[in-house]
Amino acid sequence: MTPAAATRRRARSPALASRAVLGTLGLLGVGAVLEVIPRTGLVSPRYLPPSSEIAVALVREAAGAAFWRALLDTAIGWALGLAIAVVAGVVLGVVLGSVRALRAATASTIEFLRPIPSVALIPVAVLLFGAQLRSVLLLVVYAAFWPMLLQVIHGVADVDPVARDTALSYRFTAWAKIRYVLWPTGLPYIMTGLRLSAAVALILAITAELVIGAPGLGKEIGLAQASSAVPAMYALILVVTSVRLEAAA
Amino acid sequence: MTPLLDVRHVRKVYDGHGRTVEAIRDLSFSCAPGELVCIVGPSGAGKTTLLKCVAGLLAPTGGEVVLGDVRVDGPPPGMAVVFQEYGRSLFPWLTAWDNVALPLRQRRTPPGELRRLVDGALGEVGLADVHAAYPWQLSGGMQQRVAIARAIAYEPRILLMDEPFAAVDAQTRADLEDLTRSLWRRHAMTILFVTHDIDEAVYMGQRVVILSASPTVVLEDLAIDLPGERDQLATRSTPRFAELRARVYARIQQAKQRSTT
Ligand SMILES: Nc1ncnc2c1ncn2[C@@H]1O[C@H](COP(=O)(O)OP(=O)(O)OP(=O)(O)O)[C@@H](O)[C@H]1O
Ligand SMILES: [Mg+2]
């Protein structure tokens, strides 16, 4: 019996195994299948090396300083870009959400700019900054800014009119209005915006590194592919995937 | 005596999304200092709209509201509002005590005085023992009491109340009516009390301003010549009370017939 079959049999009686165990078994099962397929020659090992080789490459990568340097570069581009986008999105969102005239005046501009895919700005980034962190930041900030902005505008619009009138008629200070009226209503929206922005920011960070060649995991993937280090490439893709899962959680 | 509040030819047209609603056509009346004036009108007459214009929360399309001798063009100091939706007017993540204290903090009231005012106001509405409760732990009537305590602690010159008891049961409502009247007499405030309930208007007010249905005008400004000391049972069973309420009722019915024919 193959491990995958064992997983399936256990899955039928979930009372016997916890979810974590099932999940691990599932991953092991997939690993086993990916080990077997290249060895049977179904797919050429040149494109899809057996998972054991990928694991070895992963260990080798993790032992080198370049890998950690790249991981750090990616993390910096992601976090810095996300931070800028979040601050800009919250501030602008509060302003646009509060001032109806401003919102009306900017609505068409936003509807025009928002659908521009961030990757379409890659040439602009290259022209402006070349293969540098700043190119990554431009793309990350642009992509992560919109979800945040829209969430905050929705959050401000969701403020209860009675609560707002209460704050106005008791002449709350601007700070108190933010602290007691805006913040409690807006917080869940900000959290949603943060989740969306964080995920899209990571995609753009990796894409920018991969395409532009700015330092980071994306660039390493590109290098591994160019030098036919296919197991290393898959190992790096695995790393990126797990980072992404972390960011989304 | 010069009026404290003067509503002069206020008109309000809501204009938005291709739909214009003339909520108020032309309203004029005034309140002397220390008066308790009831505004009564059918649902949709624009009572909330009027109150928001008076409170400076809404700009009238025409006419003006003058408080003291200043034209209202934003929430003025010395004015408190008790909203119909007490549940949404209290801040759910603050205790009853902090809800009452919050407006005073905006004025930088010194801590000693703040404590005296908040404790005093909660005591006056009979909530001395629920300082630490959150609004959602209180009944509807208790929540509205907290909102009233918040207004009292603020020591307003004028208190606006928008159908404050429409959502509580009859017994609680009667208690809150008496509470409001006793607070009014003790604090010498001016109160503008909006209701759609004719009995409530006659029982509460020194004067009743009767509004027509939309497009809204003042039908009559009626003095309520009942004695100052009122009692839910005794006052409501006097012949004069019956006369006054019949008069208000007839006035509203008459206007309805005229508008439909
Ligand atoms: N923000 C708004 N935009 C457009 N129309 C409005 C708005 N607020 C109120 N109206 C309209 O104005 C009219 C008066 O509304 P208002 O809420 O002032 O009545 P009301 O006398 O307080 O009614 P109720 O007794 O039901 O509380 C209604 O026809 C209503 O549809
Ligand atoms: Mg109303």
Image: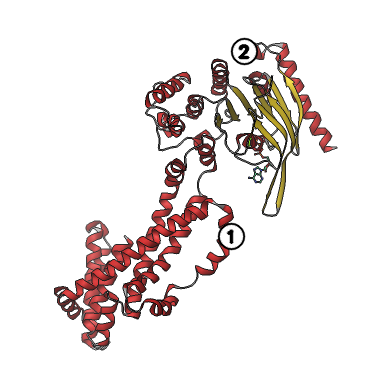
Name the quarter where the N terminus of chain A is drawn. Answer: bottom left
Distance of label 2 from label 1 (alpha carbons) = 56 Å
The quarter of the displayed image where residue A123 is located: bottom left
The quarter of the displayed image where residue A138 is located: bottom left
- Crowding around mark 2 (Cα neighbors within 10 Å: few <14, some 14 to 19, many 20+) is some
* A52 sits to left or right of B51: left
- Crowding around mark 1 (Cα neighbors within 10 Å: few <14, some 14 to 19, many 20+) is few
Residue that numbered label 2 is attached to: B230
What residue appears at the point 71 percent right and 26 percent down from the top-left corner? B209
Secondary structure at numbered mark 2? loop
Where is residue B150 drawn, in percent x and y? 48, 28
Where is residue A80 drawn, in percent x and y? 32, 64
| Residue A240 vertical position relative to residue A152 in the rendered view, above or below | below
What residue appears at the point 62 percent right and 37 percent down from the top-left corner? B52
Q: Amino acid at mark 1?
A: Ala
Where is residue A95 drawn, in percent x and y? 50, 53
Name the quadrant where ligand 1 sits: top right
Q: Nearer the viewer, mark 2 or mark 1?
A: 1
